[in-house]
Image: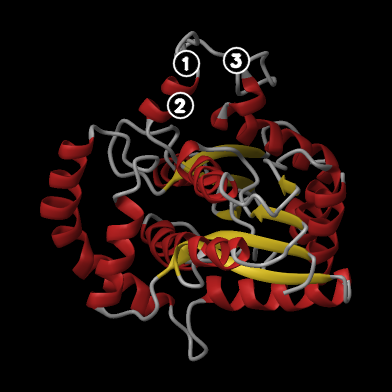
Amino acid sequence: MKDKVFIIVNTGTPEKPEKKYVRRFLSEFLNDYRVIDLPWLIRKILVNLIIIPFRTPKSTALYKKLWSEKGSPLLIYLNNVTSKLSEKLGDDYTVLGAMRYGNPSLEHLLKVIKKSTVKELTVFPLFPHYASSTTGSANDLIKKNIDVLSNTPSVKIIGQFYSHPAFIEVFANQIKKYNPHLYDHVLFSYHGLPLRHIQKSHPEVDYATCNCENELPAHGTFCYKATCFETTRLLTKRLNLAEGSYSVSFQSRLSKNWLTPFTDRRLEELIASGKLRVLIVAPSFVADCLETIVEIGDEYRNLFKQLGGEELTLVESLNDNDDWTKAIVAIANS
């Protein structure tokens, strides 16, 4: 391993779309206190005795839909970007791809680095917006291992990059390929979070009256809801989208007590208002995965057509785009 190491990190994926692998992945993921922030005993009982037995068969079926002949798209894109970054950063760097949950394991890589003579470590969590259950969890694991890396004098963890010009440019260019002005409406769909997570981050804020949707408020730097709306403002400005031709929603909810408006409900409203051709963008994902390919591309598209919609088109994410690789380097160096 070289003196300089650069690690990119995404959430994770099961090794195979089979029940035992999905169960193992869900167990690691859902037992993280950052994901389900309940007291230890309650979390263990809820996750291991109720959620995992219930969700494993359903999740396995979804992963089977997602899987390609080459495997999990999230892992394929991670490996491709890792290779491209290695070429771009040159011989001075060892570039590694890791998953917070599952394999290749971030925790395992950090333990390997701990035994090496690495002098400079850069870790880039691939999450545009800060959330306790994504960036926060990855940071916890990194810092836990870095604390004992006495032989690592230089450590850099890249934070959220939702407003970085390089990210906005590359995502706007991706959207432009789909001619957004030709659609009746553009819907920006972000991964949802429990309201409890949002309120916990900023207990002083009344989210019933907060103006996050219209401006980045004083508390907004690390407010997931506020930063999602800010990303939309930056992208729509770059794309010259007219006010009223786009909106924001949140997907992947597990209960009614999650960020609203919900994407499926918003699609129903759009059809009711005569918006029958909709372009949907998911800027909280830099790589296509279960939430984009299956949830939006399959489930929401079927719902949209059943309700009378004509066309629901998903903008492909950044994936292993060459310009995205350049943007990663630009963000890391800023």
Image: 257 above or below 78: above
Front residue of 46/255: it is: 46
Judging depth in this view, the residue of 92 and 160 nearest the camera is 92
Residue drawn at (47%, 57%), measured in percent from left and top? 309
Q: Position of residue 229 (x, y in %)?
A: 63, 32
Q: Position of residue 292 (x, y in %)?
A: 51, 61
Of the residues under marks 2 and 3, which one precedes in the sequence? 2
What numbered label is drawn on residue 331? none
Q: Which element carries disc 2, helix, strand or loop? A: helix
Badge 1 element? loop
- Please indicate, yes or no, whether residue 120 appears anywhere in the rendered image: yes
Label 3, secondary structure: give it.
loop
Name the residue beneath numbered marker 1.
207
- Determine which residue is flagged by label 3: 211
Of mark 2 and mark 1, the one earlier in the sequence is 2
- Mark 2 lies on residue: 198
Spatial CA distance of label 2 from label 1 is 9 Å
CB of mark 2 within 8 Å of CB of mark 1? yes
Please say if the residues under marks 1 and 3 sit with CB atoms less than 8 Å apart. no
The image position of residue 174, as x and y in percent, is: 76, 61
Q: Residue at x 66, y 20 (%)?
A: 214
Quadrant location of residue 115?
Answer: bottom right
Q: Residue at x 75, y 72 (%)?
A: 94
Disc 1 residue crowd, few under 14, some 14–19, many 20+, Cα 10 Å: some
Q: Is residue 190 left or right of residue 156?
A: left
Q: Nearer the viewer, residue 320 or 302?
A: 320
Q: Going by the image, does 75 lie left or right of 66?
A: right
Does the image show residue 270? no
Q: Amino acid at mark 2?
A: Ile
Number of residues whose C-alpha sits closer than 10 Å to that of mark 2, classed few (under 14), some (14–19) or many (20 or more): many
Select label 2 or label 3 by which is in front: 2
